[in-house]
Amino acid sequence: MIREKIIENVGIIYLDRPEIINSLNMEMVKDIEKILKKWEDDKKIKAILFDSLCQKGFCAGGDLKSIYYDYLLNDKCKNKDEFYEEEFVLDKYVKDYKKPIISHYFGIVMGGGIGLTVNSDFIIADESVNWAMPETRLGFVPDVGVCKHISKLPQALGQYLGLCGESLSSSDLIKYDLADIYIKSKNYDKVLNILFSLSKKYDGEKLIEELKKQTQKYKVLDTNSKISKNKEKLEKYFAHSSIEEILKSLEENKDDDFAKKTLENLKERNLFMLFLQFEKYFICKNLTKDQVFDLDLKILKYARKTGTMKEGIRSLIIDKESPNWKEKSLDQVSVEKMKSLLGIEKLYKER
């Protein structure tokens, strides 16, 4: 499921679980950490490259079926939060890794795959990228530290992505500093050859600096995307000061096809987690990356204990039917529970 290879002075970690687009399980997490630790003090290795051998993309996130059967339904499992705890240890380790990390985004790039690589020193993205954090459909919220990056986005866009789980293209990733270069897939091998050649001369920040310079000739300039086309609609519906106002504005404009589809999307999601994510967008602006990881783990444990994670995975992945959430309307959401979970005294609209 994980393959390793060294070319010149670059250690390559390939995700290789094509049948489920490299969805991460415990074995993969531990193998990645083991390889990184082996290479961290190896003087021959000047940089790490995260890549995929799956044609459909880089990574579809965590292995939700494994989480469901091996942890949530498994009465013999003593620590039902073990996978997320280990995954977060790895993600924090990658964030603070001693050597430069380069990541290759293509096709499906979601959830845990983003968490693993979002703090890379150089991210390469191509025309096929479908980048998303769809966790509110699963009974929790965008996790693995990614909300630190979402919180840096303009409010309307950050809320749209966090609440709806909609996707970004490579042009969006470049515009909002979530990737470093957008290339055509046909030029990826040329970019790799530059990396391999530079690894013989440079290391550390100098290697990344030279890589950025020498790959500019393959850079794609493209500003067209679904996000850019809908910028005015995002401002209209998602720049409000509460989740209630967002839902109300969408409800009042159902003659607008965008509003209608977006509202239908949100109605499938857990209301408690939507409320939570709305507030979390603002909170994460003032947290460190490590603090965001810690908050994410706290929320995941809450989602597991209360059964929302189980219901989300069951409905979306296992039985493929509409979920049966506990809260049927916003007035059933416990604001006090949410405040306690987030560690806040006032909601955003009250601050």
Image (spheres, rainbow, N blue to C red):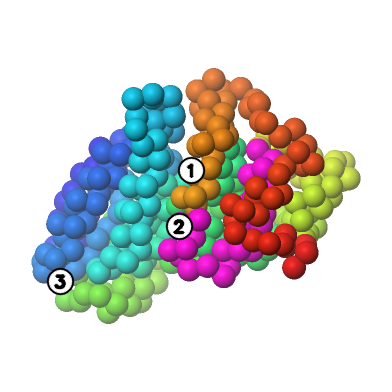
Q: Position of residue 100 (x, y in %)?
A: 28, 68
Q: Secondary structure at mark 3?
A: loop
In this rendering, the answer to whether 245 lies above or below 177 is above
Image depth: mark 3 or mark 2 in front: 2
* Of residues 125 and 296, the one drawn nearer to the viewer in this rendering: 296
Dominant secondary structure (helix, strand or loop) of the stretch shown in magenta: helix
Between the residue at mark 3 and the residue at mark 1, the CA separation in whole angstroms equals 45 Å
Distance of mark 2 from mark 1, alpha carbons?
12 Å
Mark 2 and 1 residues: CB-CB less than 8 Å, in contact?
Answer: no
Q: In 3D space, how far apart are the residues under numbered discs 3 and 2 (Cα atoms)?
A: 35 Å
Q: Mark 2 against mark 1, which lies toward the viewer?
A: 1
Q: Which mark is residue 200?
A: 3
Q: Range of the magenta residues?
A: 270-295
Image disc number at residue 293: 2
Which of the 4 quarters of the picture holds residue 279?
bottom right
Q: Residues within 10 Å of mark 2 (few under 14, many from 20)?
A: many
Indicate the quadrant where residue 252 lies.
top right
On the image, the x and y values in percent for residue 39 come to: 16, 60
| 41 lies left or right of 247 | left
Q: Quadrant of the N terminus?
A: top left
| Mark with earlier residue (3, 1) | 3
Please state which amino acid type lies under the numbered disc 1: Lys
